[in-house]
Amino acid sequence: MLEEKILVNSDFFIKTIQEYNDRANKVKIINSVHNDETLKDISIYLRIRPLMPNENEINSFETCFPNKNNPYKAHIYEPTFRFDDKPIIKSQSFDFDYVFGPNDDNKVVYEHSIHNIVEISLAGALGVVLCYGQTGSGKTFTINGIEEYLALDLFNKMDKVINDMNLKSLETFNERPFEIKISFFEILGNQCYDLLNNKEEIFIMEDKFRNIAIKGLQEYDCITADELLKYINIGFSHRRTKPTQKNDTSSRSHAICQIRIHNTVINQANDGIIYLVDLAGSERHAECIQARTLATMGLKQHIHIPFRNSVLTKLLKETFDIESCTRPCTTIFIANVSPNCLDYSHTLNTLRYSSPLKVTQKKGYDPLKKKEYNPKDPSTWEYKHVVEWIEKASNGAIKPEFLVPNKENGIQLCNIPEMEFIRRCLLSKGVTEKRAKLFYLKLWGLIVDCRTKQRKAKLSSKPKPKNTLSQDE
Ligand SMILES: Nc1ncnc2c1ncn2[C@@H]1O[C@H](COP(=O)(O)OP(=O)(O)OP(=O)(O)O)[C@@H](O)[C@H]1O
């Protein structure tokens, strides 16, 4: 058996991989254009777990490593054999928005990749964290750890946000400006079950206005971080698991923790939502993410996003369907892998699948190149156009100095979450919450119209079959 042969030759492989890896770490980084500080629409991270004690016992060794000098690169080494049975190594490298190594604990993962989501969802945005990978690669370990830090962070950050948003100055301020509600459910094939309500069946449905609603789901109000954590732990303990060779408690379903943040001071605003998703292995959602990242890259042809094909992607439609999404949305995709030599082919699959999801711009695409000004497309507006639009569209009622105090351009204006947008509008004298909400919808009407026109234009420019992603199955 190949596995036995690999383990028998482990001394050779360990030594050779070490040499290869030392060499890979010495390669100079040229023109690396990563910027960790900016919160992108979609970020793709890799997490390599440590070897487990039971793997060490059988003489297993590591084949996947983060680059020591370039945190955006990972290397994988295939232990294999020549035709004459001589052991050899083949190496490959993959790029990510960041690579977490076996020594990075959940706190590091949380602080580096997730914590920004808390602030934006308190301001009304949508934040989605998806963990993906083969069985036993550390998905549940990661999402569980993130949930614990997030629960504490959410309650800690509330005071800061109340001050930053100046909520106390609003007439409608009350003692509990944010209500935090949690629900926890699992998706098993096309069926969904409420993990906080005796696994009752629930239904994810799309109404005729294409809004998604979950029928039958119980939500629990949490006053403290401890309460939030208590529900998270109950949800996890009720999840369907089955022992596998790799993992005694392998998950068979997607587990989704939904945290809804309702702002009681600015009632008109949509709630901020955080989804934490522990995925059972399936590639349908990754296909949607892939199509979604392509859709943001300025490609000429229309990219079809097959989000209606699974219950999960239907639920997370706003994440995937950039044309109908009416609020800022941030998605964090964490690919989890095992470094164990015996998991080599699964790990390579995950790397091959997830690394290209990272938004790599098309040749010749320059995100900094100025787009030609179009009064109907906010993404082309400079600050002066934003000011013009605010004054004209609000008949002078909303003061640009309050809505865009940092001289925001059109893209930045569209990225202001709803609650924050409404709050800024309320700083102009005489503006009511309802009027502020209508003004927000006016802006998003423009954005959606513009996206729809772009899609139609792309559709009419007849895509070449080899580049399209339009087959649903
Ligand atoms: N980064 C890590 N550090 C330490 N231990 C880890 C790490 N990642 C995973 N583990 C351990 O590895 C084992 C498998 O992890 P986990 O259950 O999270 O895998 P999984 O990908 O969710 O598997 P499945 O899909 O079968 O549910 C667990 O015992 C977990 O504690």
Image: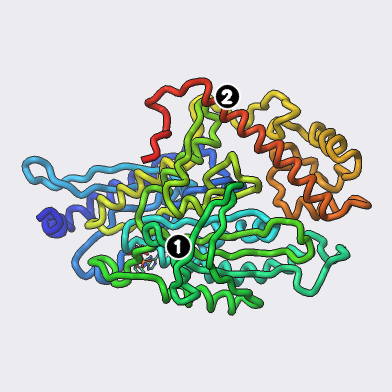
Q: Nearer the viewer, residue 124 or 133?
A: 124
- What is the quadrant of residue 53 in the picture? bottom left
- Asked if one can make out residue 48 in the rendered structure from this viewpoint, the answer is no
Residue lying furthest front: 208
In which of the image's four quarters is ligand 1 placed?
bottom left
Q: Nearer the viewer, residue 223 or 455?
A: 455
Question: In what element is the residue under mark 1?
Answer: loop
Mark 1 vs ligand 1: CB below 8 Å: yes
Mark 2 vs ligand 1: CB below 8 Å: no
Number of callouts in the render? 2
Q: Residue at x 27, y 59 (%)?
A: 340
Q: Nearer the viewer, residue 462 or 370?
A: 462
Residue 239: x and y in percent read 40, 71
Instruction: Name the residue type under label 2.
Output: Ala
- What is the quadrant of residue 254 in the picture? bottom left
Residue under label 2: 457
Q: Nearer the viewer, residue 341 or 419?
A: 419
